[in-house]
Image (cartoon, grey):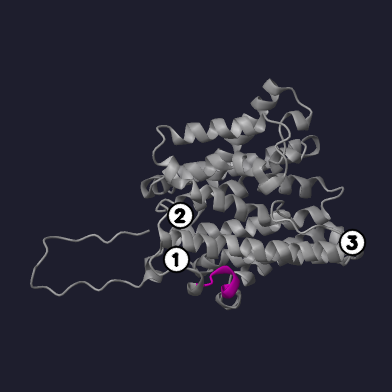
Amino acid sequence: MSSLTLQGPVDAEAPAPRVAPAASRRDPYFDNAKYLTILLVGVGHLVPVVMVDSRATLALYLYVYVFHMPVFVLVSGYLSRSYTGRPDQLRRLLTGVALPYVVFEIAYTLLIRWGKEPNYPVSLLHPSYVMWFLVALFVWRVTSPFWSVVRWPVAVSVVIAALAVATPDLGGALGLPRILQYLPFFVMGLRMRPEHFRALRRTPVRIAAVVVLAVALVIAYQVAPRVSLNWIWRTRSVQELDMELVPGLFWAGVLFLTAVLTTAAFLALVPGTHRWFTVLGSGTICAYLLHDLMIKTGVYTGFFAGAAWLHTPLGRVVLVLSMLVVMTLLCTPPVRRVMKPVTEPELAWAFRRDGR
């Protein structure tokens, strides 16, 4: 992500400059963004288990859901800019996205069978819980070269998302409604450049970002009791949300613009230098895949329902803080090493050496 620049004229007799290891060339800004976003993902998935009869908790859930996945998707798009479909990239897509999806979709299916529905079918076409994102990432990344040749890529992706919002009965296969409705954020990430992120981190923009996020939190608290959560889950059309097409598209547009604004505000506040948590940004896939297994296990065993104190204001605070700690631990290098056979396998034996 960072670039190597030459200072002054090049001396032909001078020794070649040392090239930094690949790990040190990682841009800390994006690792920081990934880590901070995965914390929001964990909180967003934990909050519903203690959300009943708590307006503040519902508002927090609504607030986080407006922008946490858009941030994740936009950063994923930015980091997919170099994808052209080369053989090595296709291999990485299969081993780093498709394989984890298959393994963890089966794991989630077994968990559901154990704790909720004994006859729950194994179906790779219907992602369970958080697994839709891996399907979406696979589809988005495969289509990345297409967006480099379209004249107005962001506008086209917004039209596609609007059509998805306006089309009932898309069904749940492969999480298609979410894939299409989140598509503009991926395409925006593809089209962004380093200077765009530098502009976001200017001091005036950061000050404005604090105001935007604070106002958004107040608004979330005000509207929380009256908003259907199906809007922020992005799994249904406006007709399925019992709205007429035109007003439904209007409110979907308001939600989209709110997500864009709060996403930009969040990214403006992400630190751009190395911090103690920067290294954790490379392990977010482990936290993403594992955290909901833990939450659903707690739900199915009755842990959350049985502990009445967890449903008090203090209990909710303790739960949220505990989830931040758990997500941090799941991003650590030891967990990444343990998970590597599933999340980052080599599988050289499965591919042709000539790439054909």
When asked about the image quadrant of residue 158, the answer is top right
When asked about the image quadrant of residue 225, the answer is top right
Element at label 2? loop
Res 152 label: none
Q: Is residue 66 visible?
A: no
Q: Position of residue 19 (x, y in %)?
A: 28, 71
Of the two numbered discs 2 and 1 in the rendering, the one whose residue sits closer to the viewer: 2
- Placement of 208 over or under 137, stated as above or below: above
Category of crowding for the residue at label 1, using alpha-carbon neighbours closer than 10 angstroms: few (below 14), some (14–19), many (at least 20): few
- Looking at the rendered structure, the kind of residue marked 1 is His
Q: Which residue is mark 3?
A: 305
Res 79 label: 2
Q: CA distance from mark 2 to mark 3?
A: 40 Å
Which residue is pictured at 53% across the width and 39% down the height? 184
Q: Which residue is mark 1?
A: 274
Q: Split into 4 quadrants, where in the image is the C terminus? A: bottom left
Tell me if label 2 and label 1 are in contact, CB under 8 Å.
no
| Span of residues in magenta | 340-347
Element at label 3? helix
Q: Position of residue 252 (x, y in %)?
A: 65, 31
Along the line of sight, which residue is nearer the eye, 328 or 90?
90
- Looking at the rendered structure, the kind of residue marked 2 is Leu
Q: Is residue 55 left or right of residue 184?
A: right
- Say whether residue 346 is magenta: yes
Element at label 1? loop
Q: Split into 4 quadrants, where in the image is the N terminus? A: bottom left
Q: CA distance from mark 2 to mark 1?
A: 18 Å
Label 1 or label 3, whichever comes before in sequence order: 1
Which residue is pictured at 83% across the width and 48% down the height? 54
